[in-house]
Image (cartoon, grey):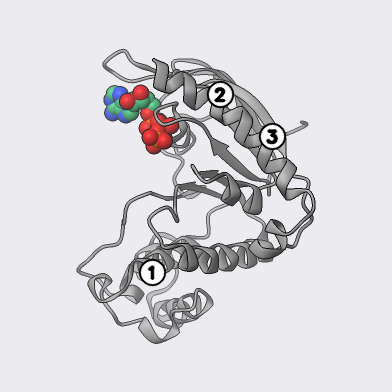
Amino acid sequence: MTNPLISAAGITIAYPNGLTALKDFTLDVAQGEFVGIVGPSGCGKTTFLDAVAGLMPVAGGRLTYKGKPISGINTGEVGYLFQKDSLMPWRTAAQNVYAALELRKVPQAEWRQRAQDILQKVGLGRFTDKYPAQLSGGMRRRVQLAVLLAFDPPVILMDEPFGALDAQTRTIIEDDFLRLWEQNRKTVLFVTHDLEEAICLCDKVVILTAHPGTRKQVLEVPLQRPRTIDEAKFDPEFPQTLKTLSTSLRAEVGRTLAL
Ligand SMILES: Nc1ncnc2c1ncn2[C@@H]1O[C@H](COP(=O)(O)OP(=O)(O)OP(=O)(O)O)[C@@H](O)[C@H]1O
C-alpha cells in the first residue's frame, strides 16, 4: 500500500513485566479504511490499539502515523472508544460532549447548540440534560459516540464498543454508526470478538494468532458499500466470508486453550 495512514512494520510490544503482547506484527491501514481486528483472548488486540494511540511504546519494529513514528500520545488525531464506559458520571450527556468541544477549542458560546446537534444525530435529542446514570447502556454508548463525533478525530479506535449491548440495541447502534461513518469515512480500527459484526462493518479483517499475537491473515470483506447490517447479513458473499474467518480464528482459539 502506498502512503498508509497507519503502518505497523514488524512491531513487537512488551509490558514492563517482560510479557511480549505482540510479536513481529505487520499491518498497513489506509486513510478512510474500516479495519477489523479479531483474535483469541489475550493475543494483543487492545495492546495494538493502545500503541496506535501512543499509550504503549513499541519495543521493536516501526509503528508510524502519516509516515512518522508514533511517540507519545497521539492527541488530536486519535479518538478511543473503550470497552468500558468512559463518561463522566457527574456531567449530563451535553456536558460530556462539551469536554470534547473544549478540547477542540470550540468557542464556549457554541457548545450548547453543537452538543444538541450531535446528540440529535445519535438519536439522543431528548436526553441532552440527563446524567449517565439516568440512561440505558445503549444510550450511554450513544453519548460516547457523540463525544467522539464532537472530538472529530481522523482516526477512531474502538475496542469491543458494542459488546455489552443486547442484540437488538446492538444492531441499531451498528447501523447508526455505519450511517455516520459513511458521511465522512474516518479511519477506524475496530476490535471485536463478534465475527459477524466484523464482516458487516469492516473493509478488511485482520486475524491475529494466539499469544503472543502476530498477523495470521488479512481477509478483504467482499461486500458493497453503503450497506446496512441486514443487507450485509443477507448478502450472498456473507456465509462464505464468515466461514473463512471462523475457521481461521477457531484454530487460534484452540491454540490459546491448549497453552
Ligand atoms: N498492563 C499489563 N501488564 C502486563 N501484561 C499485560 C497488561 N495488559 C495486558 N497484558 C497482557 O498482554 C497480553 C495482550 O493483552 P491484550 O489486552 O492486548 O489482549 P486482547 O487481545 O485485547 O484480549 P481480550 O480479547 O481478552 O480483550 C495478554 O497476555 C495480557 O495478559
From the image, which quarter does the N terminus lie in?
A: top right
Name which residue lies at 44% across and 26% down: 43
Q: Is residue 158 left or right of residue 55?
A: right
Residue 235 coordinates in the image, percent (x, y): 76, 56
Which disc is residue 244 wearing? 3
- Sequence order check: which comes first, mark 3 or mark 2? 3
Residue 139 is left or right of residue 224, and the answer is left
Q: Position of residue 195 (x, y in %)?
A: 57, 44
Q: Alpha carbon of mark 3 to alpha carbon of mark 2: how far?
A: 11 Å
Looking at the image, do the residues carrying marks 3 and 1 touch, with CB atoms under 8 Å apart? no
Q: Nearer the viewer, mark 2 or mark 1?
A: 2
User: Amino acid type of disc 2?
Assistant: Ala
On the image, which quarter does residue 206 sit in? top right
Q: Is residue 126 visible?
A: yes
The residue pinned by badge 2 equals 251
Residue at the spot of label 1: 97
Q: Position of residue 64 (x, y in %)?
A: 58, 29
Q: Nearer the viewer, mark 3 or mark 1?
A: 3
Q: Earlier in the sequence, mark 3 or mark 1?
A: 1
Q: Is residue 96 above or below residue 117?
A: above
> Mark 1 or mark 2, which is nearer the start of the sequence?
1
The image quadrant of residue 113 is bottom left
- Asked which secondary structure carries label 3, the reply is helix
